[in-house]
Amino acid sequence: MKKLGIIVFFILFAIPLPFAALYSLFALAGIVMELAELNFGMVVVYLMIMLAAVPYGLIYIYALIRTLDSEKVSPATFAPAMQLAVAALLLVLINPVAELIGASETRFGLRAGDYEIVESLDTHGGFHGDGTYYLILDCSKNREKALKAVSKWDRLPLPENMDQLMFGDEASWYRIADEAKMPRVENGYYVFQNRSSDKAAFDKSGRIENFTIAVYDTDADMMYYFEWDT
């Protein structure tokens, strides 16, 4: 009966295991992406998430083996509970640490936290993560920094295929730019990333599955960022 109680106890401790695994994968993917953009502040944030999530599985196994071997509850039995407490503390500290080190997500070199967020909306969801995300930044108060970042982008206007994708024509029944809340900008810079499995399809037929686009208006110092995932 005593052993049965211990097993039930550890069944409850097994509930956080899949969440710890998902958080670990999420943090690893975040580290890879932020390293690619040299955003070391966000790398620190994702490392905190990894420290909160990664050890849980090993600590759970350790505590289970120690408890079953001794056939009694001991301090080792509560190791998963202590790890959960540490994980909760790390997650609570993430926002203050992020603010302290000035970490925020970057959009092709523009760090959102450095500018005023005018509007944003994320509709991603479901098993496949389909949806869209748009972000509008007012960069006027930090204009020089923004211009330095976007100087690595391409000069407007958009190429014909990208312009057609976003704005369509008179016969188009749907314009992606409307959903992105992206006006037609005359002067500025743009960056486009084709994230489709078949990247050549966009050039040949105009068909595209996943892409990201950002446009910077140098007249108004506004940045429009949009992700499309289908």
Image (cartoon, rainbow, N blue to C red):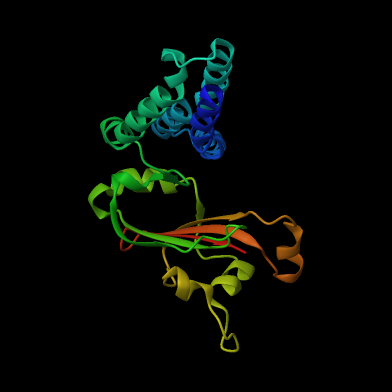
| Nearest to the observer: residue 70 or residue 51 | 70
Residue at the extreme bottom: 171
Location of residue 105 in the rendering, given as x and y in whole percent from the top left corner: 41, 43
For residue 102, say whether it is visible. no
Q: Is residue 165 above or below residue 170?
A: above
- The image quarter containing residue 170 is bottom right
| Nearest to the observer: residue 144 or residue 127 | 127
Residue at the image point whose x is 46% and y is 19% from the top:
77
Residue at the extreme left: 141
Marks counted in the figure total 0
| Nearest to the observer: residue 165 or residue 188 | 165
Report whether 209 appears left or right of 94.
Answer: right
Location of residue 80 in the rendering, given as x and y in whole percent from the top left corner: 46, 24
Q: Is residue 107 above or below residue 96?
A: below
Q: Is residue 138 above or below residue 184?
A: above
Residue at the image point whose x is 60% and y is 74% from the top:
164
Residue at the extreme top: 70
Quarter containing the N terminus: top right
- The image quarter containing residue 14 is top right
Quarter containing the C terminus: bottom right
Report whether 165 appears left or right of 214.
Answer: right
Residue at the image point whose x is 60% and y is 65% from the top:
159
Location of residue 146 in the rendering, given as x and y in whole percent from the top left corner: 35, 47
Location of residue 155 in the rendering, given as x and y in whole percent from the top left corner: 50, 57
For residue 22, say whether it is visible. yes
